[in-house]
């Protein structure tokens, strides 16, 4: 198989994984946005009005476990934050491992 075909496959894999992670972040962001408007689920402090893009931003910082701390959940919604952090850590680690294994296959094919 030509060498450039392997590179394209790895680049496509990485782009697909980035798209998948972006979709996961948006799903959690939409969840935060919906839950903040329902009574009894808690709220966010640190910003006057939390819009959809603010929720997606918050979701990205939680998913990547970066956690700036400028937006803080209060109440039961904190449990969703914990769930997202574990989900993000698991999916990002799995993605890195899977990408490495695919690259390892490519390297092994190149040595044959």
Image (cartoon, rainbow, N blue to C red):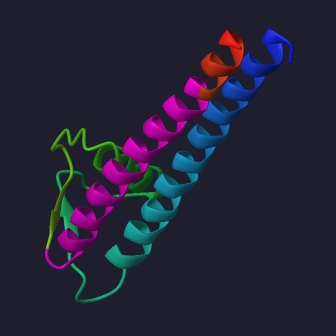
Query: In the figure, residue 106 lies in which quadrant?
Result: top right
Q: Position of residue 49 (x, y in %)?
A: 32, 58
> Viewer-proximal residue, 76 or 17?
17
Q: Position of residue 61 (x, y in %)?
A: 31, 43
The answer to whether residue 97 is left or right of residue 104 is left
Query: From this viewpoint, which residue is outermost toward the right?
Result: 1
Q: Residue at x 66, y 35 (%)?
A: 13
Query: From this viewpoint, which residue is outermost toward the front?
Result: 112
Q: Main secondary structure of the magenta part?
A: helix
Q: Residue at x 35, y 53 (%)?
A: 90
Q: Considering only vertical position in the picture, is 41 above or below 13?
A: below
The answer to whether residue 110 is left or right of residue 20 is right
Q: Considering only vertical position in the picture, is 13 above or below 56?
A: above
Q: Residue at x 35, y 85 (%)?
A: 38
Q: Position of residue 7 (x, y in %)?
A: 72, 17
Quadrant containing the N terminus is: top right
Which contiguous range is marked in magenta?
A: 75-104
Q: Considering only vertical position in the picture, is 23 above or below 12?
A: below
**Residue 54 magenta-highlighted:** no
Query: In the figure, residue 72 lies in which quadrant?
Result: bottom left
């Amino acid at each position: 198989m030509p060498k450039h075909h392997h590179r394209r496959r790895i680049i496509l894999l990485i782009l697909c994984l980035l798209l998948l992670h972006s979709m996961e972040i948006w799903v959690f962001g939409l969840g935060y946005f919906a839950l903040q408007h329902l009574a009894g689920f808690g709220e966010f402090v640190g910003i006057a009005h939390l819009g959809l893009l603010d929720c997606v931003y918050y979701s990205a910082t939680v998913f990547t476990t970066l956690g700036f701390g400028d937006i803080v959940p209060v109440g039961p919604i904190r449990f969703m934050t914990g769930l997202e952090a574990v989900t993000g850590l698991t999916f990002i680690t799995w993605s890195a491992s899977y990408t490495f294994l695919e690259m390892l296959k490519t390297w092994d094919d190149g040595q044959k």
